[in-house]
Amino acid sequence: MFFVKTKSDDNLPEEARSIVEALKNSQSKGECLYKAYNFLSKKYQGTIKNNIINFFDLFLNENEVWHKKLLSCNTLNYLLKKILVGSKIFKLEEIESKWTFLWYFSPHQYLKIKMDDLKTTKIDLWAASRGIEFGDYAHGFHLKTKE
């Protein structure tokens, strides 16, 4: 998943299609993003150990990824992009991948999502299981340890 670009025309697995269909009923971008974030943050978890131990998970295909529980930051972001773009409420150009460092040496990816002409929201699904809330992202030492 690390080297795969998000395409809005890819076929989604059945589970993802049902999520996308539910998101299409959202009344706003904010509602759509919040629903997607809640679904994915409850289903998946990002951990530091998993990134090291299961390094080759970075190379899983999309169908394999949907059935995992522990995912890397970039893989979680890929899934979020897929369902947001699939909902037709967001365009791929409105979702920007950003990089930062954890503990000032470990690269970490989060998303900056354009909500309207003036507002963007930062989203970090990987850090949700580590105490970082909706609208914030892990960086530096700004990360709660739960492991």
Image: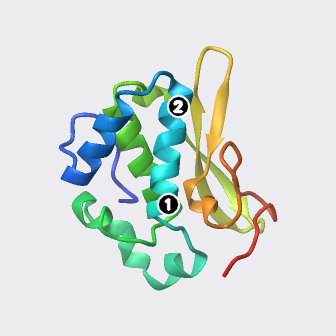
Q: Amino acid at mark 1?
A: Lys
Residue visible at 40% across and 36% down in the picture: 84
The numbered dot on residue 42 is: 1
- Taking the image as shown, residue 69 lies to the left or right of residue 65, namely right
Residue neighbourhood size for the residue with mark 2, other residues' Cα within 10 Å, grouped as few (<14), some (14–19), many (≥20): few
- Taking the image as shown, residue 108 lies to the left or right of residue 60, namely right
| Callout 2: SS | helix
Q: Amino acid at mark 2?
A: Glu
> Which residue sits furthest bottom?
53
| Callout 1: SS | helix
The numbered dot on residue 31 is: 2
Residue visible at 35% across and 71% down in the picture: 68
Of the pair 122 and 57, the residue shown nearer to us: 122
Residue neighbourhood size for the residue with mark 1, other residues' Cα within 10 Å, grouped as few (<14), some (14–19), many (≥20): few
Looking at the image, residue 80 lies above or below residue 112 = below
Of the pair 100 and 62, the residue shown nearer to us: 62
> Which residue sits furthest top?
117
For the N terminus, which image quadrant?
Answer: bottom left
